[in-house]
Amino acid sequence: MQLFIIGRSGRGKDTLANYLADEKGMKVLKSYKVGKPKYEGDDAHIFITEEELKNYPEEDMMASTLLNDTIYFSTKKQYAESDIYIIDPHGFYELIKKEPSDDYVLVYVYADPEVAKTHALERGDKEEDYDKRIAKEDADFSEFEKQLDNGEVENIVIFKYKNDYNMAHFTDFAESVYNYLQLAKS
């Protein structure tokens, strides 16, 4: 069973994935990103150069996407060995076309924009970079949010979580997702 986590920047996707990894032993796919970290200590991706990208044949790539002028992708091997994949809407649709399955669960993490921005700045994002990233994300995520609200994402179990950055609420939600995954496996 594969858990996908989708949401705009600064919404808590990595926090949810890391909680499930640290507390429940789930394996998080760390995708490749062509470019540099967003902030000091950013380890959400495996950062490579455009030159290094040539070492990854297209037929081995899963869910490659261009988001905010940056290429992200994973390999088939990474995907096969993971339980959790933090992904954007485009990559998600590409992946489910390549690898259709009845065993997909999606968590869409959202938050009030100002609260999310404060969170992102506290973790080390630069305000100008964050604002540019959010503006570029808007079209992709707005369309995906409409599709979720209209029930257009079919045959996938969907959890929506409004992150208020309250750790007790977050832990309760993470536990409910994990419990669902365990029940679905049995």
Image (cartoon, grey):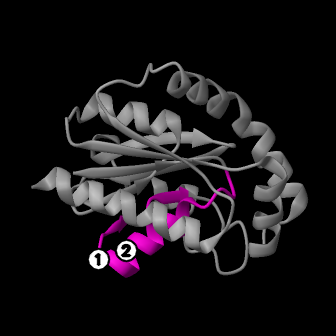
Q: Is residue 153 left or right of residue 100?
A: right
Q: Secondary structure at mark 2?
A: helix
The label shown at residue 25 is 1
- x and y, in percent, of residue 88 in the image: 53, 43
Q: Which residue is mark 2?
A: 21
- x and y, in percent, of residue 65 in the image: 51, 40
Kindly give the residue lying farthest to the left in the view shown: 186
Q: Residue at x 29, y 61 (%)?
A: 179
* Nearest to the observer: residue 73 or residue 24: 24
Residue 55 seen in the figure: no
Q: Is residue 136 magenta?
A: no
Q: Image quadrant for the C terminus?
A: bottom left
Query: Eyeballing the image, is 123 above or below 88?
Result: below
Asked whether the beta carbons under mark 1 and mark 2 sit within 8 Å of each other, the answer is yes
Q: Amino acid at mark 2?
A: Ala
* Nearest to the observer: residue 160 or residue 79: 160
Q: Residue at x 33, y 44 (%)?
A: 105
